Amino acid sequence: MKSFAFHRPQSVPDAVALLRGNGSAKLLAGGQSLLPVMKLDLAEPSDLVTLAGIPELRGIRAEGDALVIGALVTHDEVASSAEVRQRLPGLASLAAGIGDAQVRNRGTLGGSLAHADPAADYPAAVLALGATVITERRQIAADDYFTGLFQTALEPDEIITGVSFPVPECSAYAKFAHRASKFAVVGVMVARTAGGVRVAVTGAGGKAFRVPALETALAARFSADAVDAGAVSPDGLQSDGEASAEFRAHLVTVMARRAVQACS
Ligand SMILES: Cc1cc2nc3c(=O)[nH]c(=O)nc-3n(C[C@H](O)[C@H](O)[C@H](O)COP(=O)(O)OP(=O)(O)OC[C@H]3O[C@@H](n4cnc5c(N)ncnc54)[C@H](O)[C@@H]3O)c2cc1C
């Protein structure tokens, strides 16, 4: 690992000022994605800007019909929050299934969404729940946020401050996990609201995506039996040593059925 300057700003504007005009500065949240990449010399930031000294990025609060979760809230805090468990049980169980205890104790919601790993769990929740990613300068709708493999709509000096999750009638997440890392080989989040059903898949492609045919089938009849009518094609899905595209397409159907069954 190369040497770097370390900064601990006390406010979001100070953190933005440290990033601005310095293309090789990087934010540090839980370090669970960035530090492994730095150890492999795949990232060599000149400056690390930790968010740890900025209290406004922490906390979970109700705002109208939504829960707003701060960018620095850890996966374990999401999983164990009484409010999240009661109002967004699908999100709480998703967070409880991320990695291992160390990853859940250090890794954060904002870090996961900024990193945008195609096999990460939160992207499925953000898309299925129709969440809004809040930064220090704007609000980004879930459907506009993930732009490609490890790519998002964020500007290089933009900081996620939190995510607003509308509370649905029900939500559930089912994952076929990689046996070692627990990343999603395929994960499916289902959310039912008065306005319809949203279904999002992670792990199967270059980025998380919604499944319109499945959403239509489930809006007409919200039942595990209806899932087959929205089966996805393997064309364009990820194929690797863990699972072929055909197996992943099959897993989408199986995980969607489980998520619908758990959605009550
Ligand atoms: C062994 C292992 C297993 C894992 N298993 C899973 C799993 O099963 N499911 C899963 O979803 N993930 C998994 N992860 C990833 C984990 O969830 C990471 O915590 C997460 O992806 C990154 O969050 P972080 O807070 O650690 O971010 P960091 O590593 O600190 O940062 C990641 C990136 O985000 C940027 N960043 C951080 N915070 C912000 C912000 N607020 N605004 C803008 N940019 C920001 C950083 O500059 C960096 O580029 C695993 C990781 C490990 C090491």
Image (cartoon, grey):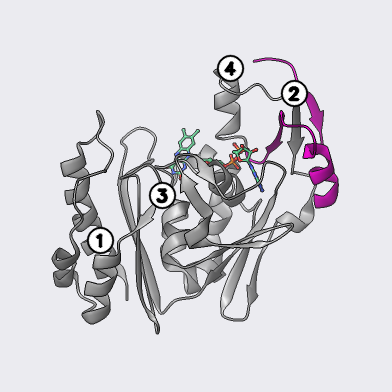
Proximity of marks 3 and 4: CB atoms separated by less than 8 Å: no
Q: Which mark is residue 97?
A: 3
Reading the image, the residue beneath label 4 is 41
Q: From which residue to which does the magenta span run?
A: 1-30
Tell me whether circle 2 and circle 3 mark residues in contact (CB < 8 Å): no
Q: Residue furthest bottom?
A: 194
Badge 2 crowding class, 10 Å Cα cut-off, few under 14, some 14 to 19, many 20 or more, is some
Describe the element under mark 3 as helix, strand or loop: loop
Q: First in sequence: mark 1 or mark 3?
A: 3
- Residue at mark 1: 256
Q: Position of residue 180 (x, y in %)?
A: 35, 32
Location of the N terminus (image quadrant): top right
Q: Tell me if residue 223 is in the magenta stretch.
A: no
The residue under label 1 is which amino acid type?
Ala
Viewer-closest of 261 and 249: 249
- Of mark 2 and mark 3, the one earlier in the sequence is 2
Q: Secondary structure at mark 4?
A: loop
